Image: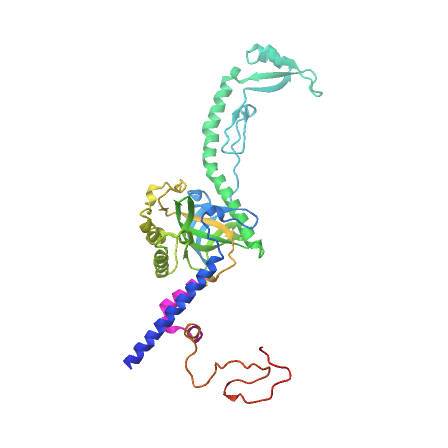
Amino acid sequence: MKGLGEGRNGADETTAERLTELLDYVGQVIKLDERPTFRLSEYRLANGQTFTFHEHEFHALPGITHDLTDDDGAIWLSAERLKRNDPPAPPDGVAPWIELSPDPDRAPVTRDHVLITVPKAECDEIVASGRARAEDCAESFAVDAKGQFDIRLRLEDWPEIAIEIEGYISQSWLPWSVAERPRRRSIALYQKLFEVAQLSEMGGAEQAIELVWGIGLSRWMFEGTLIDLPLIERLVEIEIDEGAAGTIRVRPRQAPATVNLRPYDELKIDGVPMAQDAARRALSAADGVRRKPVRARYLRTGSAGVSDQTGSGGLPDSERIEATAPPPSATQNLVVTDRWVLAARKRSDNFLLQDIANLKVAIEESPAGLPGPSRTLVMGPAPSNSNRWSALPISLGGTFGPMASEEPATPLGDLFC
């Protein structure tokens, strides 16, 4: 009985090995028809648009929150629909002297003069007080200003106005600008996310898109080829909650996280298969991936097989990179940061590669539990007394197997000639 069990286990292992090899072969055939992506900028939609959101762009913005949970599950990113705040109104005496913009990045422009229209008596009084110059006064030609005079007032003649302007800018406008700038950035990001959500919902079969959350952004200039992609990817979905004032939420989908080493494989980097397998095992052991736990352990696993073979690369500490700073530029050394990136891309027409990866995992976990058809596929039919695999008859309407009998040839002739 022991020998029989050992033989059965050996047969199961052989079947599993052959089936895995067959799946590897099918995967390689599929990859021949797919050009791997090397850069985030290559994620273009059918209309040519690109949508890429980096982690530093969302840092400390109002209305932006991360890592939430509600009744529907995890929320990796939430963006509220905010409204613009107008700049504070200047005092009445200051308003004519400044050009005010609703843009918080555009400082108020101080005018060096203003024009006013007053009666002649008031005009003479202003000139007499030294607040205006006689050559700056002229009778108004406006139809409804008969007997009125136009006066050009120069700011240099009104020093108290200049002081008020400085006080307004420093005490009112500047605090508003500082608070409004991140708010405007949040609004701009919301508008882009809103557009992505609409495209995701309304895109037809030819314009179907998918949203991918990448973790561990890697940048590398290898022999003139730029790699700018995250190592770990997770498909996410985007939704607009009109019941919550249009809040946009990004959630992880049920599909598991994957390790994307296709660019390195395309460049024939040694160690990629080993790194791919090690990273897949790590993700499988972690039962999926969330953003925070993955920041060191799994990123090192994913990059180790590449960097060890080239003598370069590494994972810099997150403290070395300012939270508001963009990721470092690509160099000849592979650099994998712990940053995340959100990108929209055309939905892949081929899901076979992921299915193959899932099948390989199932085979590895339970080589003895393979169903009958999979065994037959790689090992052939099991021996049996009944000749169920007899060749088809060559005549139309003929019988096969042990029940075949001699019959006159049909007038229709042979089916297979």
User: Which part of the image, by quadrant, shows the N terminus?
Assistant: bottom left
Instruction: Give how far across and how far down residue 231 sits, in percent.
Output: 40, 52
Q: Main secondary structure of the magenta part?
A: helix
In the image, residue 30 sits, relative to residue 50, either above or below, namely below
Foreground pick, 247 / 218: 218
Can residue 80 be seen from the camera position used here?
A: no
| Identity of the residue drawn at 57% across and 10% down | 128
Magenta residues span 356-374
The image quarter in which residue 102 lies: top right
Residue 21, percent from left and from top: 40, 66
Quadrant of res 397: bottom right
Q: Position of residue 237 (x, y in %)?
A: 49, 55
Image quarter where the C terminus lies is bottom right
In this view, the residue in front, 273 or 170, is 273
State the count of labels: 0
Residue at 42% in and 72% down: 378
Residue occupying the far right of the picture: 143
Q: Is residue 35 visible?
A: yes
